[in-house]
Amino acid sequence: MDPNNENELSRLWELVNVLSEQLAHNRAAANELQTQATNVKSQAVHTGSGFPLRRFNLHLDVEEYNSELERMTAALAADNASITHDNKQLAALVREYEVTLESVMAKFRAAALSAQEHELGIARRYESALLESDTNALMEQLQRGSGFDATLARVSRRLRAALRLSQGERPLPEDDDSDEPHVVPEDSRDAYTGELPTDSALEREAELVRLQRENAELRRLLGAAPPEEDDGGGMLAFRAPTLPRFARRMQQTSATNGLALYTPYPGVGRGLAIGRMAPQEWSDSDVWRNVQERDARAGLLS
């Protein structure tokens, strides 16, 4: 026989033996699993019926089984009674705790309410005190301001009266020394009662300064005096109009008593007669000093 065939037969025989052993092992495992399934099924049936002791306590006789069952039932009843008693005690404790907590919270609410009312009362008292002090301070400040205004008004009236007296004028009728403010009647607040008082001294000074300026302009135009420059001390250098403009203005003027009228600033004031000009001995410094005095008096009267 061929050796190769013998080797193949031996190897095939070995494989058959291995498969047989594996099959026997699988058959044994299947039988074991079937037995376990049957046991589990029977346990499930007994568990659902509720009488497992009759099935699994077959080693005990009936009397011993009944005595054990009675003992177990008595123990369960005792445990049930103990648990019921504990439950009742706990329920009583819970009710007592609730009552105690309610009383404590009632006292706490009363104390909190009284404390809050006390704090609110203190806050109201302090607010009223602060409001009263602020009102008093504002009233005092208003009174001081009113007194200062009245004093200032009285001083200003006296100064105006003194200035009018120094200018040779009579004080106005409303320049009295009373501390009470001047009250305008209700029926005359919206009505014009007459012409306002005129300041003749101020108008006279303004007219004098205007005439002096016009005189200086004419003197420069006619060559009677050389033009003066600004010396830095406040003197103003008057700018004279050009000769063509001067000639046109002279042609536009009319004759009054044989004297020509010259208006250096058309539309402002009236014409100036050469024969009525200011004295020629007045210098520019005198004119400037008079202008400053007039401005100072106007500032005091304003």
Image (cartoon, grey):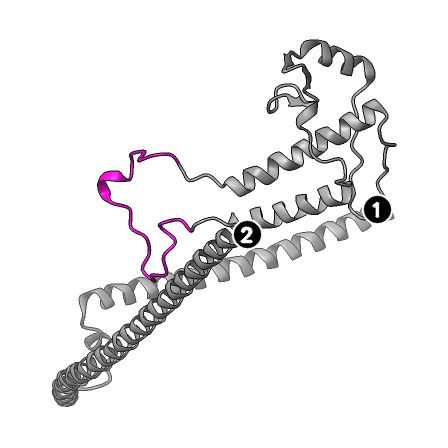
Q: What residue did someone put label 1 on?
A: 232
Which stretch is magenta?
Answer: 171-195
Q: Would you call the spot at circle 2 few (<14 residues within 10 Å), some (14-19), or many (20 or more)?
A: few
Q: What residue did someone put label 2 on?
A: 300
- Three-letter amino acid code at the position of disc 1: Gly
Asked if the residues shown at circle 2 and circle 1 are in contact, with their CB atoms under 8 angstroms apart, the answer is: no
Residue occupying the point 21% across, 86% down = 60
Residue occupying the point 40% across, 37% down = 196
Q: Position of residue 148 (x, y in %)?
A: 42, 65
The answer to whether residue 189 is magenta is yes
Q: Is 269 above or below relative to 142?
A: above
Q: Position of residue 253 (x, y in %)?
A: 67, 12
**Any mark on residue 142, and which?**
none
Q: Is residue 301 left or right of residue 144?
A: right
- Three-letter amino acid code at the position of disc 2: Leu
Q: Place residue 270 in its image quadrant.
A: top right
